[in-house]
């Protein structure tokens, strides 16, 4: 039977930063923000209206469902008490 050899050499615990190494230049935060905003694809008015209407309708329907479930649970508790 072949035996596996085990390497007992110590492994580095992670990247060690050299405290004397110069730091890389950073972009301005506002320049990065402006670059990210330029990548955004804003919806047109029609799409925005349709999506907003769907959000409002779904919110109202979900509110009604939650209210009905609450009324049924409340009625059930009142019957038990």
Image: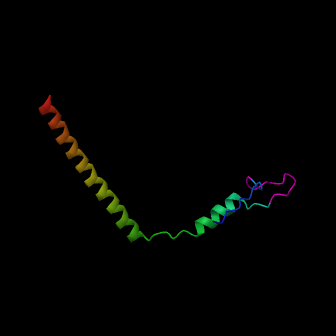
Depth check: give the residue in front, 18 or 23. 18
Q: Is residue 8 left or right of residue 33?
A: right
Q: Is residue 22 above or below residue 70?
A: below
Q: Quadrant of residue 34?
A: bottom right
- Residue occupying the far right of the picture: 20
Q: Quadrant of residue 40?
A: bottom right
Depth check: give the residue in front, 75 or 37. 75
Depth check: give the residue in front, 50 or 45. 50
Depth check: give the residue in front, 19 or 49. 19
Residues shaded magenta: 13-23
- Residue occupying the far top of the picture: 81
Q: Residue at x 59, y 69 (%)?
A: 38
Q: Position of residue 74 (x, y in %)?
A: 19, 36
Q: Residue at x 15, y 32 (%)?
A: 78
What secondary structure do most residues of the magenta stretch adopt? Answer: loop
Task: Name the quarter where the N terminus is drawn.
Answer: bottom right
Q: Is residue 4 above or below residue 20?
A: below
Residue 22 covered by magenta stretch: yes
Q: Is residue 34 left or right of residue 40?
A: right
Task: Name the quarter where the C terminus is drawn.
Answer: top left
Q: Is residue 24 left or right of residue 52?
A: right
Residue 20 covered by magenta stretch: yes
Q: Is residue 15 above or below residue 36?
A: above
């Amino acid at each position: 039977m072949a035996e596996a050899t085990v390497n007992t050499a110590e492994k580095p615990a992670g990247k060690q930063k050299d405290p004397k190494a110069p730091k890389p230049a950073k972009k301005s935060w506002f320049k990065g923000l402006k670059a990210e905003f330029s990548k955004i694809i804003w919806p047109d008015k029609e799409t925005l209206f349709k999506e907003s209407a769907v959000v409002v309708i779904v919110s109202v329907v979900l509110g009604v469902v939650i209210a009905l479930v609450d009324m049924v649970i409340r009625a059930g508790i009142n019957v038990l008490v």
